[in-house]
Amino acid sequence: MTSEVSAGSRSPSDSRSPSGSRLPGGTRAGEGSAGGLRERKKARTRVAIRDAAMRLFTEQGFAPTTVEQIAEAADVSPSTFFRYFPTKEDVVLIDDYDPLIAAAIRAQPASTPVIEAVLAGMREVFERLTEDEWASERQRQELFRTVPDLRARQMQQTVAAVDILAGVIAERLGVPSGDEGARALTGALVGVFLTFMYGGDGAGLQPADFDRVKRALLSLRTHLEPL
Amino acid sequence: MTSEVSAGSRSPSDSRSPSGSRLPGGTRAGEGSAGGLRERKKARTRVAIRDAAMRLFTEQGFAPTTVEQIAEAADVSPSTFFRYFPTKEDVVLIDDYDPLIAAAIRAQPASTPVIEAVLAGMREVFERLTEDEWASERQRQELFRTVPDLRARQMQQTVAAVDILAGVIAERLGVPSGDEGARALTGALVGVFLTFMYGGDGAGLQPADFDRVKRALLSLRTHLEPL
DNA sequence: CATGTTTTGATAGTAGCTGTCATTTGCTAG
DNA sequence: CTAGCAAATGACAGCTACTATCAAAACATG
């Protein structure tokens, strides 16, 4: 299924610019600080850039913060900044929750209905976050909420992640990967999520939202009946 | 809706830009060809820019085409280009089919179930397109499919349009505007649409897709049962 | 025709991003 | 330890989207 490379978020290596240009700093989910000095240094640089950027973004806003400022704060050259992140936006966009969520869903007991399994899987991943991770995640969400460009790209990533999620769901349902029903179900789920996260009041994602989504899906039944 | 049907790129007047809007060409609902010479000239300039842009985009691609080229082809200065379209992307993005779809949904008989009404409404707008409008729409869709930046912004528009659609649906259901159930239903609908349009094979929107969506929603019931 | 308003083009400037190349830095073989 | 190699970096130059400003041109109106 044309799996769109990046799940709802970007995994380590980007693959976005066609013209080659490998980015340094790709440690897999393993995250081990192992590896040579080179690897460790790259990881440190990467973190330094992201931390500096996030700090400046929340201090002065996204647009007013220039790449030059970020580079200076992280003590690298602007060139180096772009070697680690293809665009300024990517500093905020990158996360790798997708594989975690996929795994958490797969780990649900087989007797659990699909929808519950998905919701439970997502919930678990978010509940496992440390206090620091939550703080940083809130910052991200705040940026997504306030910066249109970021929100746009975030949504695209989310929709792209449907492919991955649909795969997991199909697997669970015992239907061939790429099955249309599985994809539709996934689309509906993600659609409801997006609506709650960014529509109307748009308060970002919160733990309680998982229950909201479930309740909303239940009410969906009513409307599907007359078909 | 903004996106999925978003048909004929050539509807006469723009009518977007809620508030300030220093952009020229904003003949209000009053509709185009009437009005003073000034208004007519603005409308012509707008069309000229968009036509030139779309032609160049399909000829050479979106990114390689510079605003300067477009301006030259449309016989205006680059400054003027930006007065008519805030960004290069907006030339492709702008469409105002949302109100049409909303109206078409409202026009469905009250006895029709919500979901059917929505699908029928969209389909009608879709089917009313002329051959030229279709051709131009296909061009747009092609760009959305191939240019990530455009796709991202289009999705954002789509999700934003959920608010409008949710209003119409709520109205039809006789529940207060902003009702969570209505929003969820809308989100699910749009989610399924997006999945079919851009996921997997990703062949863009086609008339037959309305049936696909309906069938997919039906299969959704199965999974909602065990909740 | 004279007046005021809108639209336009020219110009200059900022910032994101790309490409190139010489220099430095970590790695490894001898 | 050192010589040599590959990767990473920084400096530089360049392109383009986009903004701001201001004077000239085009329309409108009395």
Image (cartoon, coloured by chain):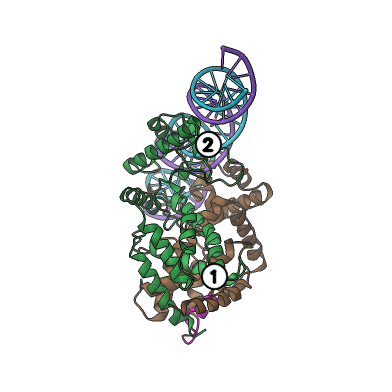
Chain colours: A brown, B green, C purple, D cyan
SS state under label 2: loop
Seen from the viewer's position, the closer of residues C6 and A215 is: C6
Seen from the viewer's position, the closer of residues B90 and A62 is: B90
Question: Height in image: B185 above or below B122?
Answer: below
Q: At 35% across and 48% down in the image, what residue appears?
A: B136
Which label belongs to residue B184? 1
Q: Chain of mark 1?
A: B
Question: Height in image: B19 above or below B43?
Answer: below
Q: Amino acid at mark 1?
A: Ala
Q: Position of residue A214 (x, y in %)?
A: 56, 77
**Magenta region, residue range:** A108-121
Q: At 64% across and 65% down in the image, what residue appears?
A: A134
Instruction: Tell me which label, 1 or 2, sits earlier in the chain.
Output: 2
Q: Position of residue B12 (x, y in %)?
A: 44, 43
Residue A120 lies within the magenta run: yes
Tell me the quarter of the image containing the N terminus of chain A.
bottom left
For the question of whether residue B136 can be seen, the reply is yes
Mark count: 2
**B203 lies left or right of B195:** left
Q: Residues within 10 Å of mark 1 (few under 14, many from 20)?
A: many
**A156 lies left or right of B54:** right
Which of the 4 image quadrants contains residue A179? bottom left
Q: Residues within 10 Å of mark 2 (few under 14, many from 20)?
A: some
Seen from the viewer's position, the closer of residues A150 and A46 is: A150
Q: Chain of mark 2?
A: B
**Label 2 sits on residue:** B24
Q: Position of residue A37 (x, y in %)?
A: 52, 56
